Image (spheres, rainbow, N blue to C red):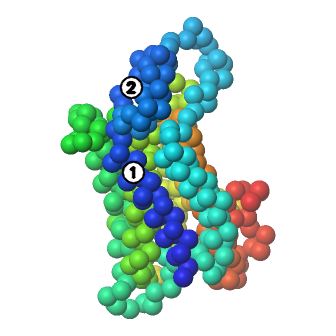
Amino acid sequence: MVMTHNLLSITLVAVLNYLLVSAFAPPQALSSTAATNSRISALSSNSLDSLSIRRTYPKSNLSSLAANNLNMFEHLSTFPGYIGIAITAVQIFLTATSFSQEANPKTRTPYSKFSSAKDDSSSSTWPSRVAMMVIYTPSFIVSMTFLVLGSGVTALGPLSVPEPSLALLFIVIHFGKRCLEVMLLHKYSGRTDRETPTIIGTYYTLLSILIAFCGGSDNNDVSNITGAVLFAVGIAGNLYHHFLLAKLRGTESKQYVTPKGGLFDYVATPHYFFELVGWLGIAIVSKHINSYLVFASMSSYLAGRSVAQNEFNRAKFEDWPSDRKNLIPFIF
């Protein structure tokens, strides 16, 4: 069925994250390069305390902004060991395949306007608003839990709680905003099968856990400021274009209307574009290769969805320009 790709991906990521969280405990922030080397050596000896190498580095004598900017991406890393390799491989697989799946009408994920569920009250479907809450709420709860526990607790049973990070805070904000939009802003009219939102919600929850363990504990003002600015722009731009969609549709209408205003005059999915800007900001403050792969896989996924959305608009709206770009103004 059309969800085979998603089921395989979610299963792989779920198994890997289970191993990641249950087999290892994240270390505390290290205080020197020697401590970092010690952690790496412990990992090679099958130590169980080296899930995610939290990085702090010796103070540099370089104080200029230019020097900090050059060091912005100097200390990127991935999760260590065979589990880290497996997680990275799964993320690369998702990045390589998500675009083609979502751009293909036969294989794209069937939710929102592309839902195949009939508009009835069948026990096998949910109203779209409920389905979207199922997608976003678990991620918000899990990321908020990690943020709160990490602020005051160092261990939870046999597991250590990752230290709070700017990246994790942004995840909380992102999914909290999405939940509020679903409840208060968006207009819904259809229904969605229960399987699809459950799978997507599970996937987003696992991504939240992954970002929590990616951390980003070393202090780099340039990367933190750059990432925070991008995240803020992404959140604001995404919210603004969601507001435009809701305003155009009105309070009672269940009909789709031609998107207008903002960057809708240039691309079919400016809300996707700004969401990706936000994910890039999260990756930058995280300073972790696996976080950048989250951004890459989301880019592949939303680029494919943007193609689908543009095709939908061309078929649905007579006044929709045939040369309107999908996602990036003037480019794609």
Q: Which residue appears at 44% of the width and 54% of the height? A: 16
Q: Which x, y percent locates residue 262?
A: 61, 58
Tell me which amino acid carries mark 2. Answer: Ala
Residue 279: x percent and y percent? Answer: 53, 48
Specify the amino acid type for callout 1. Leu
Indicate the quadrant containing the N terminus: top left, top right, bottom left or bottom right. Answer: bottom right
Frontmost residue, 247 versus 65: 65
Q: Which residue is mark 1?
A: 19
Q: Residue at x 21, y 43 (%)?
A: 157
Q: Whole-Å distance between the Cαs marked 1 and 2? A: 22 Å
Task: Where is residue 90? Give x, y as percent.
Answer: 56, 56
Q: Residue 286: which numbered mark, if any?
A: none
List the single residue furthest toward the top. Answer: 61
Residue beneath the point at 52% across and 64% down: 9
Q: Dot 2, crowdedness within 10 Å: few (<14), some or many (≥20)?
A: some
Which residue does the numbered mark 2 point to in the structure image?
29
What residue appears at the point 66 percent right and 23 percent down from the top-left corner?
70
